[in-house]
Image: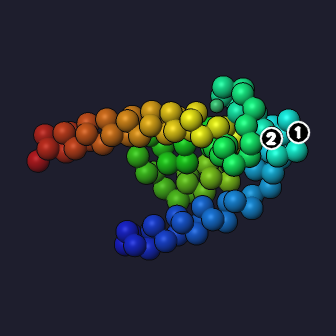
Amino acid sequence: MDSKKKSYAINALRRASYRWPARGQVDKKQRVERGKYYCNICKAVFRKKDTQMDHVSSVIPVTGWDSFDGYIDRMFCDVAGFQRICKPCHLNKSQGENSTRKIFRDIKKENNKKVK
Ligand SMILES: [Zn+2]
């Protein structure tokens, strides 16, 4: 597929997911008091602006893109698939996932070389 089309569709789906009801249910669950939420990883309490909504298992697998069916399934998951976490925990989690992605990409690249 045209990569411009694909990234346009991915962004549109991501924006639509912000209104997915399960996200609101997670906020209700993790709200400590008005405007304050606990981080589901470190359990400390933060102002909402210092937290982010996170998919427990990443929407794009660390092994790489699979399909729109898989993407949509993971993006619009149920309450258990979401968590509100603080920015430092989110950064830490994302960096770990990105390093793993890079390792998978490098391995795939190496394997493709060997086939040719
Ligand atoms: Zn945290």
Amino acid on which the number 1 mark rests in the picture: Glu
Q: Amino acid at mark 2?
A: Lys
Residue that numbered label 2 is attached to: 36
Q: Within 10 Å of the Cα at label 1, are there few (<14), some (14-19), or many (20+) other Cα atoms? A: few
Identity of the residue drawn at 66% across and 28% down: 41
Q: Quadrant of ligand 1?
A: top right
Residue 26 can be seen in this image: no
Identify the residue at horizontal 39%, vertical 34% (top origin): 100
- SS of the residue under disc 2: strand
Rendered view: 97 above or below 24: above
Q: Position of residue 102 (x, y in %)?
A: 33, 40
Number of other residues with Cα within 10 Å of mark 2, as a class: few under 14, some 14 to 19, many 20 or more: some
Residue 40's quadrant in the figure? top right
105 or 38, nearer to the observer? 38
In the rendered image, the quadrant that contains the N terminus is bottom left
Q: On the image, numbered disc 1 is attached to which residue? A: 33
CB within 8 Å, label 1 to label 2 = yes
